[in-house]
Image: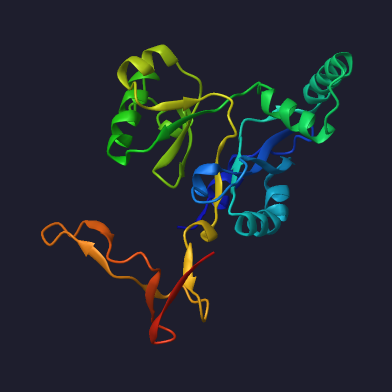
Amino acid sequence: MLINNLELIAPLLPKNNPEVFCHMQIVCRAKDHKDEKVKEGAIKTYFIRDEEHLRKVMPEVILLCEHYGARAYINVSPKSFEKLQKLMLVKLASLVCEGNIQNPRKTLNSAAGALVSKNPVWIVDVDNMEIKELLLGWFDDYFKLDPTLPFCNTREELYLTGIIPTKQGCHLLIRPFNLKEFNSNFPDVDVHKNSMGTLLYYPNSLSRRYVCSECGSPNIQVQAWVNANTNEYIDDITDDAECWCEDCMKHTKLKKV
C-alpha cells in the first residue's frame, strides 16, 4: 500500500524564512520487517527549509524508502537553526566531558529531534477511522468553533493544520490543547507532541513481500483455508511455499523479497 503525502504536506512547510527548518527522517521500523533481523533507526536525516526544498529531495527520499523498506516522517512544526546550533554545542560539550565519543551526525539528529518548536503542531494518531469525526467534534467544542462568526469559522482557521493518511488510519495535525482533558475522553488515542512527525511516504516495497521464484512476478496466488460464511482467511493449506504464477502460467515457488 503505497502512501505519498507530498501534496498534503508541502503547503504546510515554512515560507520565506531561512532561519527555520522542518526535521525529516527516513526511518526503518522493526515492525515492518517482522521476519527479518532489522535494526530500527534513522537511515537519513533532512532539514527541510520550504516546499521547494522538499520537492527537490523527494525523488531521493522515495528511492531510499523503497530500497530499504523504510518510511519517511516529517515534523511540520518549524524549528530554529540558531537554537539547534546552541543545543548541539551543549550536547557535544557534555559528550566530551563524559569521554563519550560518537558520530557527530547522531548527535545532530538527536538535537534536532529534542528541539521544541515555537509554533508546535501536535499529532493525534487515529487508527480507528470510525472515531475520526467524533474526535473532530470534540475539538470543535474544545476550541469553541462557531460557524456563525465572520472569522475563525472553520476548523482550518481555528485548530486543524491538516489530516494526513497513514497505513492504519490518519494523523490529525492539531494546535496544542489540554492533554489531560483529551485523555479523559479518549484514553486509547495516542497524541504525539514532539515526535518524528507525520507520515510523508510509505513505500510500495513493504506491501509486496512475495514474488514468483522463477520470473519475479508479484502476480501470484496461493491456496488457503477460508471461512465459507464470512470469507475470513484462516490459514494456508500447505507450508511448502507453492504458488500459482499468472505470468508463468504454472505452479512455482514463492520467493520473499
Q: Residue furthest left?
A: 229
Can residue 150 be spotted in the picture?
A: no
Outermost residue toward the bottom in this view? 249
Residue 96 lies, with reference to residue 124, above or below; the image says: above
Q: Nearer the viewer, residue 51 or 203?
A: 203
Image quadrant in which the C terminus is located: bottom right
Front residue of this view, candidates 95 and 189: 95
* Residue under the point 71% across and 50% down: 52
For the residue pair 42 and 150, the one nearer the viewer reads as 42
Q: Is residue 19 left or right of residue 4?
A: right
Q: Splitting the image into 4 quarters, where does residue 136 fall? A: top left
Where, quadrant-wise, is the N terminus in this rendering? bottom left
Left or right position of 62 against 30: right
* Above or below for 71 versus 159: below
Viewer-proximal residue, 144 or 255?
A: 255
Identify the coloring.
rainbow
Provide residue 159's location: percent of width, then percent of height: 46, 27
Residue 18 in the image, given as x and y percentages of width and height:
79, 35
Q: Is residue 52 visible?
A: yes
Expressed as whole percent of the image width and height from the top left, the position of residue 204 reads: 52, 60
The image quadrant of residue 20 is top right
Residue at horizontal 38%, vertical 73%? 242
Q: Is residue 136 left or right of residue 23?
A: left
Number of numbered tags placed on the structure image? 0
Residue at position x 33%, y 14% from top? Answer: 184
Q: Residue furthest front?
A: 240
Residue 32: x, y in percent?
51, 48
**Residue 13 location, quadrant:** top right
